[in-house]
Image (cartoon, helix red, strand yellow):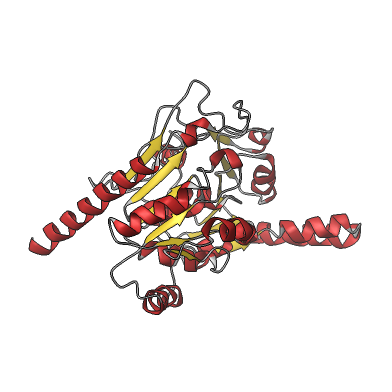
Amino acid sequence: MFFVEASVRSILIIRLSAIGDIVMASPLIAALREQYPQARIAWLVQPEGYELLAANEQLDEVIVWPRGEWRQLWQKRRWWTLLRAIVSFVRQLRGRDFDLVLDTQGLLKSGIWAWFSGARRRVGLGSREGSARLMTEVIDKPRDDVRIGSEYRELARQLGLKTDNFCMQISLSEEDRAFAREFVQQHGLEQGYVVACPFTTRPQKHWVESRWPELAEQISSQPGLPLVVLGGPGDQSVAERMMAGHPRMINLVGQTRLRQAAALIAEARLLIGVDTGLTHMGIAAAIPTITLFGSTCPYLNAGRDTGLDNTVVLYKALECSPCRRNPVCGGAFTCMADITVAEVVQTAQQLLANSVTLMSTRESS
C-alpha cells in the first residue's frame, strides 16, 4: 500500500473528463478531507466538468484547464499567445505548492499536468500512454471488482484512506434545488416523475430509439408517472424526433445546466438511462436507478456498503461483450436491442414498490 504522510498540506486531484468519471471519482474528495482535514484540496478539470465540482464545500479550489481555448489558439496559429498561456498556467500550478497529486485519469494529457505541478509525490491510477514515467508511483486498476467506481476505491484503499462509506456525491446549490422545485410546480409533478437519460457519446451505447416513447406510455399508464427526458445540446434534434407526438414525455434536452439536471434527478422517483454521466448521477443521488448497458459494462453493483442498493443493471452479455469502442455487429447492437421494454417496465415497477416500502418502514420506525 502507498500510504501518504500525515504532513500533507496541499493535494491536487486530476480528472479532466468525462462527466461520468468525474462523478465516479467524487468519493475521493470526502475520503481525503476526512484523512487530511487541514489540507488544501484542489481538483483540475476541463471546463465542461467545472460545474459538477464548483459547489462542493469540501474542495478548496477547482482549477480549470482551458483546453478548448488553447486549441483555438493553435488552430489560429497564435503561437506566442498560446505559449504565454501555457507558461502562465504552469506557473499557477506550481504556485499552489502541491505535496501530493493524484492522476486519476491515467492518460498522457493528465500525467503532464501532474508532472508540471512540481509535486514531490505523483500517484497515477492505471497510468498508460507513457504517463507512468511522469509518476512517482502507479496503482493498478482492479480487475474483479464490479462496484461502480471500483478503480477510485482501490486508489483510496492503497493510499490508506477510509473506504467504508465510499459514496459518490453531487453537490448542489440552493439555486439548483430551487430550479427543481419550480419545475415540479410548473408541470404539476408533485406526485413524482421518472427521469430518462437516453443519450451518450457513442451509438453502440444507445438503446433502440423507438422504445423510449413506448416505455413512456407504459410508465405513465402503470406507475402513473411522466417521463422527463434529459440530455445535452447536441442531442436536441434526436430528442425532438423521438418525442414528437408523445405528451407524456417532457423534453428538457439541452435546456438545463449540468447541476440543474442533477437537481431534477435528485427529486425524481426513478431514473432510467444508458451508460452516461447523468445516469451515474442517479446512483449518486441514491434514487432508484435502472442502467442499460451493452457495449460497455463499467459496473454491476452500485457500490454502496450500507445495505441500500436500489440500482438494477440490465446487461445482456454476448460473446462479443463488452466491445467498447469496437463493435463487430455491423450496427445491430444486439446487446442493447435484447433489453425489452417489458423488462424495463417490470424492473421499474419493482424498484418503485421497494422505495415506497422503504419509506413506509422509515416513517414507522
Which quadrant of the figure has residue 233?
A: bottom right
Left/right of residue 168 with respect to residue 74 in the rendered view: left
Locate residue 10, reporting x and y percent.
53, 57
Q: Residue at x 49, y 44 (%)?
A: 275
In the displayed structure image, the side of residue 156 where residue 17 appears, left or right: right
Q: Is residue 60 visible?
A: no
Residue 58 image position (x, y, % from top left): 43, 63
Q: Quadrant of the N terminus?
A: top left
Residue 80 visible in this rendered orientation of the protein: yes
Q: Position of residue 93 (x, y in %)?
A: 66, 58
Residue beneath the point at 27% across and 44% down: 305
Residue 192 vertical placement versus 317 (above, below): below
Asked where in the image residue 312 lies, by quadrant, the reply is top left
- Looking at the rendered structure, the number of numbered marks drawn on it comes to 0
Q: Nearer the viewer, residue 310 or 336?
A: 336
Q: Quadrant of the C terminus?
A: bottom left
Residue at 62% x, 38% y: name it: 135
Looking at the picture, how far across and down is residue 16, in whole percent?
61, 51
Q: Residue furthest top?
A: 319
Q: Nearer the viewer, residue 107 or 209?
A: 209
